[in-house]
Image (cartoon, rainbow, N blue to C red):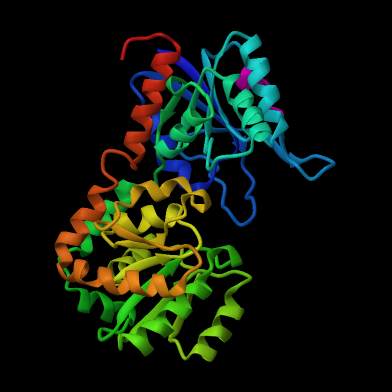
Amino acid sequence: MAKISILYHHFPHYRAPVMRALAVSKKHQYEFYGCIDDYEGIRAFKGDDFVTINPISFNFDNKGKMDISGYEKAISNDYDAIIIIGNINMKGTWKAQKEASINGLKTLYWAHGWLKKENFIKAKIRNYYFNRADKILTYGFRAKDIAKSTGFNPSKIQVIWNSLDFTKQTEYFERYKDIERSDLRNNIGMPNNKIMLLTISRVTDICHYEWLIDAVAYLESSKNLDCEIWMIGEGPALNGLIELAKVKNVKLNCQGALYDEELIAQHLMSADMVVSPGKLGLTGMHALAYGTPVVTHGNFDLQMPEVEAVIEGQSGVFFKYGDPTDLANKISEFLPKISSYNSIRDICRNSLIGRFTPEDQARLIDEAIDEVLNESS
């Protein structure tokens, strides 16, 4: 059994399930290194009875760039391989990869990798950075396709997707799936006589929720559809959106930040759709796990890799970036799809199973380690 270190700047709380899945791997022994401090409002996973986090330092250099230090043990020859957070702008990752390689470790980067096509110079630098490692673990196939188009060897890339706590989400889904939607809505005070469009994220300008407000205003005035937005989350853009909704005469119900997963489950399962206008990351996976379809934009250069969880026309739909009218039209066109309540739920959840679960991620990471160590699967 090979011994593998995983080096991150900090492990976000949502990484805990895949870390636990790796911790019980029957193929390899994984140990984890990361800062245990929260970062930019994202709670760090500090470890538990199953996973120990060996602390390192995560800080900023004199130019304001993120950096890591104090990871010497992670790159030592006590390990056979190391998985490093693949952030090209974090100079410590360059150093860690180089020193780990010198110490005889196989090296892998865990990264978004390639989000969009870049100019020649940027593409060359990015490819040089990732070529230093033996394997790149990416969140989706689009990164692999873009890399291939720049001349990067696609065989060095293993797609491992992303995941949340699908086991816990499935537990809550099973608990509430046989309850009538009207009863679910009554339990949380959500109206039964409206199309409920839910958002769940930190509320920032990059979310472009103003497009959703404009879209709802159009749906009500031009298509005579009675809609309401339920917004879960807080953030600097919230007050401006409240004022805009008043001006547009759009019903915006702000729920504040929710951290109780069971309550979140009830909200997501009560909504008709989850709308994420500006970009779709973990929000999409969260919604789909509870059987709720997703609406987001189709400009994939401005998207997050998790958008690949959405199967257009089945588990969600894409609108034209920056076009609230098209957003409104896509919502109204998709409404008949959700009339079959149980069917749409199955479609949404099945778009995750086999790819976007902690067990799938752990299996794919094990396979990548097998490959770089030339071990049989």
| Closer to us: 374 or 8 | 374
Left or right of 148, for residue 76: right
Query: Looking at the image, which residue is at 58% across and 53% down?
Result: 42
Query: The C terminus lies in which quarter of the figure?
Result: top left
Q: Is 263 rendered above or below residue 61?
A: below
Query: Looking at the image, which residue is at 49% across and 31% down?
Result: 149
Q: Is 298 rendered above or below residue 176?
A: above
| Closer to us: 354 or 46 | 354
Residue 290, magenta (yes or no):
no
Query: Looking at the image, which residue is at 65% across and 10% down?
Result: 102
Which range of residues does the magenta coloring cover?
A: 70-75
Residue 72, magenta (yes or no):
yes
Query: Looking at the image, which residue is at 51% across and 49% down?
Result: 301
Picture coordinates of residue 368 (x, y %)?
41, 21
Picture coordinates of residue 89 (x, y %)?
69, 37
Picture coordinates of residue 192 (x, y %)?
25, 83
Query: The N terminus lies in which quarter of the figure?
Result: top left
Left or right of 338, for residue 220: right
| Closer to us: 77 or 365 | 365
Q: Which quadrant holds residue 287?
A: bottom left
